[in-house]
Image (cartoon, grey):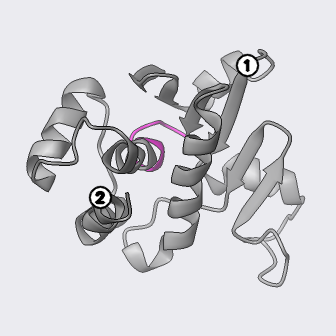
């Protein structure tokens, strides 16, 4: 787990498990397994499409995303990523925020990167390549799957322009 910005941490499932009961933390689980499955209690291959929490489940101290590390960015719902970025923004002044996925390499650092593009002065005036390089100097484990990488390439300007 690494603090990538003041009160914003990126990590893995193991990191979350190590601190999940500590006070003063808000968690964004950027993975379907095991968090979304546990929150909704489904046993089949995926969440029931008609369920009101199909994409996003809220629990006290947690935002749980139905997010898989797909190779195709069309399986990454923009509204899920946007809500996660906004939730960081809402929580970061009063809590430490951990964004985690299973390994902490793709989904969770992508969300943190997009948050920093939108709300921090760190990257927003640079090209995407410069911003990614700067982020990788902070979070060296960043290795997005093709879908997350393509999502960033396709939408990074939207996060800067929506400031």
> Label 1 crowding class (10 Å Cα cut-off): few <14, some 14-19, many 20+?
few
The secondary element bearing badge 2 is classed as helix
Is there CB contact under 8 Å for labels 1 and 2?
A: no
Image coordinates of residue 108 in percent, x first then y, are 48, 43
Task: Work out whether residue 104 or residue 157 is closer to the camera in this orientation and state it.
Answer: 157
Q: Which residue is drawn at 43% across and 20% down?
A: 2
Q: As drawn, is 81 to the left or to the right of 114?
A: right
Mark 1 or mark 2: which comes first in sequence? 1
In the picture of the structure, the residue carrying the numbered disc 2 is: 160
Q: Residue at x 35, y 66 (%)?
A: 147
In the picture of the structure, the residue carrying the numbered disc 1 is: 24
57 drawn magenta: no
Which quarter of the rendered picture does the C terminus lie within? bottom left
Image coordinates of residue 59 in percent, x first then y, are 84, 46
62 shown above or below 52: above
Q: What stretch is highlighted in magenta?
A: 102-109
Query: What is the distance, in whole Å, between disc 1 and disc 2 at their CAs?
Result: 29 Å
Q: Which residue is drawn at 25% across and 65% down?
A: 157
121 shown above or below 18: below
* Res. 139 visible in picture: yes
> Label 2 crowding class (10 Å Cα cut-off): few <14, some 14-19, many 20+?
some
Q: Which residue is drawn at 39% across and 44% down?
A: 119
């Amino acid at each position: 787990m690494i603090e990538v910005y003041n009160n914003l941490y990126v990590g893995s499932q193991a990191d979350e498990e190590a601190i999940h009961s500590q006070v003063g933390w808000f968690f964004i689980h950027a993975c379907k397994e095991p968090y979304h499955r546990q929150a909704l209690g489904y046993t089949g291959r995926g969440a029931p499409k008609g369920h009101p929490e199909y994409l996003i489940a809220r629990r006290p101290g947690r935002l749980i995303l139905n997010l898989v590390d797909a190779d195709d960015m069309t399986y990454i719902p923009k509204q899920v990523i946007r809500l996660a970025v906004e939730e960081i923004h809402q929580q970061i002044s009063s809590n430490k925020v951990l964004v985690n996925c299973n390994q902490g390499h793709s989904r969770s650092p992508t969300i943190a990167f997009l948050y920093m593009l939108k709300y921090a002065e760190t990257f927003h005036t640079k090209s995407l390549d410069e911003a990614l390089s700067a982020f990788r100097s902070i979070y060296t484990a960043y290795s997005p799957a093709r879908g997350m990488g393509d999502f960033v390439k396709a939408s990074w300007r939207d996060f800067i322009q929506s400031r």
